[in-house]
Amino acid sequence: MKAAVYRGGGRLGAEEWPRPSIGDGELLLRLRGCGLCGSDIAKIVDPATRVPAVFGHEVVGEVAAVGGGVSAYVVGDRVVAAHHVPCGECHYCRRGSDSMCAAFKASNLDPGGFAEYVRVPVPNVRHATFRVPPHVSDEAASFVEPLACCLRAVRRARVQAGDTAVVVGLGSIGCLFVQLLKRARAAVVGADALAQRAVFARDLGADAAGTLEAAADAQRELSAGRGADLVVLTGGGAAVLPWAAAVARDGGAVHYFAGGGGDALPLPLETLYHRELTITATYSSSPSDLAEAFGLIAGGAVEVDRLITHRVPLERLAAGVDLMRRREAFKVYVTP
Ligand SMILES: [Zn+2]
Ligand SMILES: [Zn+2]
């Protein structure tokens, strides 16, 4: 079968790759499409990434084969399947640190979503696979995983109704945050250097959006001068952290949701101490977040279709990566 294979040093292209065979309890999916995530790009630019590798974890596929003992799915079903599943029983899982569970890190789709066929392991079939209803498009379904990560972040950040929240970076993830924070009944301010992204964020419900400077003014006004209860960083971490700390209110929080290599914390701990600031982060999602995200998408509660701006076949994945890195694309959707 064909897969988009990363060979290191920026080399990414379509190659022949062994088609996975499935065992009991597993599914084989024929790829329908897979979203390109910022974390895929982070791995491509990280020299420590082990190669060869097939990325892609926002997978929508059609069931091509069903392993022994699987009764919940039949050949031909259209499903969305996520890549990581925690054990649900260990110390980490019992405390909500699902994404730190050893089983979570060890589980994965095989070989990854940027391939013509994908094997879905047993725990993923049981806990992270959802049948897509006819009224939901493939492209919308591919947002279940990224939306789940954002849902978990909003929960971990303990957003309350009446909060003022600032979202830095209005790419596809920032636009999901804008919508979820509005659903949590916060006043939402978006910040992005690209003017058309700010316009789009306002269209999706942000109370205000603009450059960092405009966002700082807007959050001050919306919070009656206190500053933002929460600042969510979806990009530009190191450069904007001092700014984020400055616009957060005393006792407020900064939530880091980016994962870019080299981001550091240029923030005096003294500031953290005297202003009781909280810094939190979210990496990935749990099965319950996936289920909730699936429900929101199936119910049409979150606008996702308009976030996909570019569609590329597997052979042109590298071009899709360039489009995202140049910030020309919001979201790139990859098809076989
Ligand atoms: Zn992702
Ligand atoms: Zn666990």
Image (cartoon, rainbow, N blue to C red):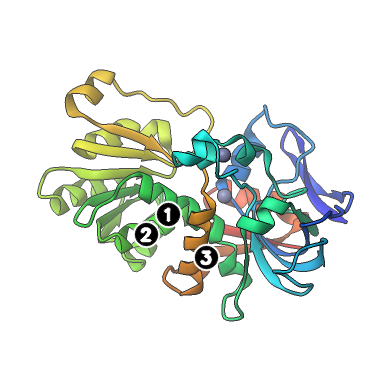
Quadrant of the rendered image containing residue 54: top right
| SS assignment at label 2 | helix
Tag 2: residue type?
A: Leu
Horizontal placement of 318 versus 229: left or right? right
Can residue 9 be seen in the rendering of this structure?
Answer: yes
Query: Where residue 232 sits: x, y (%)?
Result: 35, 44
Q: Calculate the distance from the C-alpha at mark 1 to the C-alpha at mark 2.
A: 7 Å
Tag 1: residue type?
A: Leu
Q: Which residue is disc 1 drawn over?
A: 151
Mark toward the start of the polypeptide (2 vs 3)? 2
Q: Quadrant of the N terminus?
A: bottom right
Q: Nearer the viewer, mark 1 or mark 2?
A: 1
Badge 3: how crowded within 10 Å, few (<14), some, or many (20+)?
many
Asked if labels 2 and 1 touch by Cβ distance under 8 angstroms, the answer is yes
Mark toward the start of the polypeptide (1 vs 2)? 1
Identify which residue is drawn at 46% across, 29% down.
Answer: 263
Identify which residue is drawn at 41% across, 30% down.
Answer: 238
Can residue 192 be seen in the rendering of this structure?
Answer: no
Q: Which residue is disc 2 drawn over?
A: 180
Query: Where residue 38 sits: x, y (%)?
Result: 56, 46
Tag 3: residue type?
A: Phe
Identify which residue is drawn at 20% across, 52% down.
Answer: 218
Residue 19 - label: none
Q: Residue furthest bottom?
A: 135
Identify which residue is drawn at 61% across, 47% down.
Answer: 85
Residue 294 - label: 3
| SS assignment at label 3 | helix
| SS assignment at label 1 | helix
Mark toward the start of the polypeptide (1 vs 3)? 1
Badge 2: how crowded within 10 Å, few (<14), some, or many (20+)?
many
Q: Calculate the distance from the C-alpha at mark 2 to the C-alpha at mark 3.
A: 14 Å
